[in-house]
């Protein structure tokens, strides 16, 4: 039977645009994570935040783990949602830089705009992957060619005529209707 439920992942590797985008985001996560681990001070200066090098290193480890999970997973969607959650944490962290001092306010604002753009890309990818998969909203099954009879409709036709009612299921003698001739029918 033909199944109309769309699936994101084909055997091996899927070729959908959202899966390709997810792979690209996986490589981006690896590169960003390595940069955050190797040069947290430079990342902090670029984002306009001070004294958060340890936090940035932790974010780097998160990015690397997420990138590996995206690239190694058959279904990258949950890991893309992890990226979205990480983006929100990054936005909250950089937002503290806007409040720190006026010198870094411009860099923090630019970093926030960049993070917002990356978050939108991550959201588009996650929503696209979700829409490609058969879920409750998109799953459609076609049962129009099924009859409900295991041997087919032709084999079931007239089968009830040959059915013999067992004696223990017949109407008891005392409950049978009387016929007009004065006896039981």
Image (cartoon, rainbow, N blue to C red):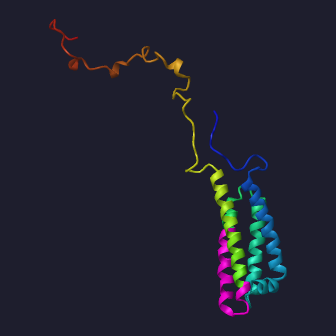
Q: Residue at x 64, y 51 (%)?
A: 133
Q: Name the spot of residue 66 as percent of width and height, x first.
A: 74, 68
On-image quarter of the N terminus:
top right
| Residues shaded magenta | 83-107
Residue 95 to residue 22: above or below: below
On-image quarter of the C terminus:
top left
Question: In the image, is residue 105 part of the stretch drawn in magenta?
Answer: yes
Q: Name the spot of residue 102 as percent of width and height, x first.
A: 69, 93
Residue 124 to residue 94: above or below: above
The residue lying toward the viewer, choosing from 13 and 94, is 94
Give the quadrant of residue 174: top left
In the image, is 124 to the left or to the right of 41?
left
Q: Residue at x 65, y 84 (%)?
A: 95
| Residue 74 in view here | no
Q: Residue at x 70, y 88 (%)?
A: 105
In the image, is 184 to the left or to the right of 3?
left
Residue 105 to residue 23: above or below: below
């Amino acid at each position: 039977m033909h199944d109309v439920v769309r699936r994101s992942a084909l055997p091996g590797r899927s070729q959908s645009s959202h899966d390709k985008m997810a792979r690209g985001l996986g490589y981006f996560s690896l590169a960003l994570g390595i940069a955050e681990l190797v040069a947290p001070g430079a990342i902090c200066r670029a984002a306009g935040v001070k004294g958060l090098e340890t936090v940035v290193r932790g974010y780097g480890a998160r990015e690397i783990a997420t990138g590996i999970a995206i690239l190694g997973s058959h279904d990258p969607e949950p890991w893309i949602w992890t990226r979205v959650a990480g983006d929100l944490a990054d936005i909250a962290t950089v937002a503290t830089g806007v409040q720190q001092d006026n010198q870094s306010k411009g860099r923090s604002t630019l970093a926030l705009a960049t993070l917002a753009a990356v978050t939108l890309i991550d959201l588009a990818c996650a929503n696209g992957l979700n829409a490609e998969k058969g879920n409750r909203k998109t799953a459609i099954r076609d049962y129009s060619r099924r009859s409900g009879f295991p041997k087919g409709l032709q084999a079931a036709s007239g089968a009830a005529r040959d059915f013999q009612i067992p004696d223990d299921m017949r109407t008891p003698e005392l409950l049978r209707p009387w016929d007009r001739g004065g006896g039981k029918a």
